[in-house]
Amino acid sequence: MARRTCRYISAPIRNSLLVLLVLLSSPLSAQDTLRVELGDTVKIELPKKKDKEMRIYYGVAVGADLVGLGMKVAGVEWSLMEVMARVNLKDKFFPIFEMGLGEADHEGNDLDYRFNVRAPYFRGGMDYNINKKHNGNRLFVGVRYGFSVFNYDLTSPTPLTDPVWNDSRPFNHESLRGTAHWAEIVFGLETRLWKMIRLGWDIRGKFRMAQTTGEVGPPWLIPGFGKNDTSGWGGTFKVMVEL
């Protein structure tokens, strides 16, 4: 008898009961909407599950470049040793600050002279993560502005001969003052190695914007930029701790 009486429940009542069952089994928040189409059959469209909202601040990271340290240990005539700190915003934008120490002890090939410099440099800029997946791996493009104010020495152990007057003069010029400003375009990769430890590398195109030099001659190396030219290439291999 119970089975037979169910046939005589009116369609509106039956539809209302079905909607009530859906509401009880899938509670909705105030922002959710429920679409119901009534007729001979009931069509119920539940709202799609919303993605977890991204935070704005994801922490900071500090790190150091291993390339410059390796050059220093290997005894190469010049090196750029640096550390960095950056902020993670939405896992997309990474404001970054880099500072380091550039040094060189170079002997000229064509003339008997020696170039020495040891001075700090600073860079600031932004990296952008173009990897859409938030899986711990990052693909960066970025920009930097760098500058350095430094003193350098140009000396010679023997007097230099003047090609015009054919006389010899000492060549010892110390604490020549120089400044340099440059821009960098950065492309890099980064991955999580273990928990908070990350490894990353990048290549950089460098473009000198302005420089001032001593009266005797330009520096052979600009701290933070590299060998003195209008443009050049560089790169880093960093180990970082993400806090």
Image (cartoon, rainbow, N blue to C red):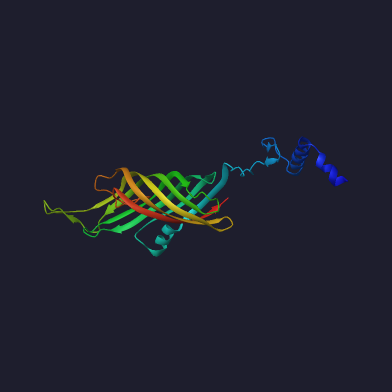
Query: Could you say which is closer to the camera, residue 242 or residue 175?
Result: 242
Q: Residue at x 20, y 56 (%)?
A: 159
On screen, residue 112 versus residue 236, left or right, reads left
Q: Furthest residue to the bottom? A: 74
Q: Is residue 225 shown above or below 42?
A: below
* Image spot of residue 8 (x, y percent): 82, 39
Label tally: 0
Query: Could you say which is closer to the camera, residue 80 or residue 196?
Result: 196
On screen, residue 142 versus residue 173, left or right, reads right
On screen, residue 234 versus residue 40, left or right, reads left
* Image spot of residue 155 (x, y percent): 27, 54
Corner quadrant of residue 166: bottom left
Q: Furthest residue to the right? A: 1
Q: Residue at x 41, y 45 (%)?
A: 143
Q: Furthest residue to the left? A: 165
* Image spot of residue 211 (x, y percent): 30, 43
* Image spot of residue 115 (x, y percent): 29, 55
Q: Residue at x 83, y 43 (%)?
A: 6
Query: Could you say which is closer to the camera, residue 1 or residue 68?
Result: 1
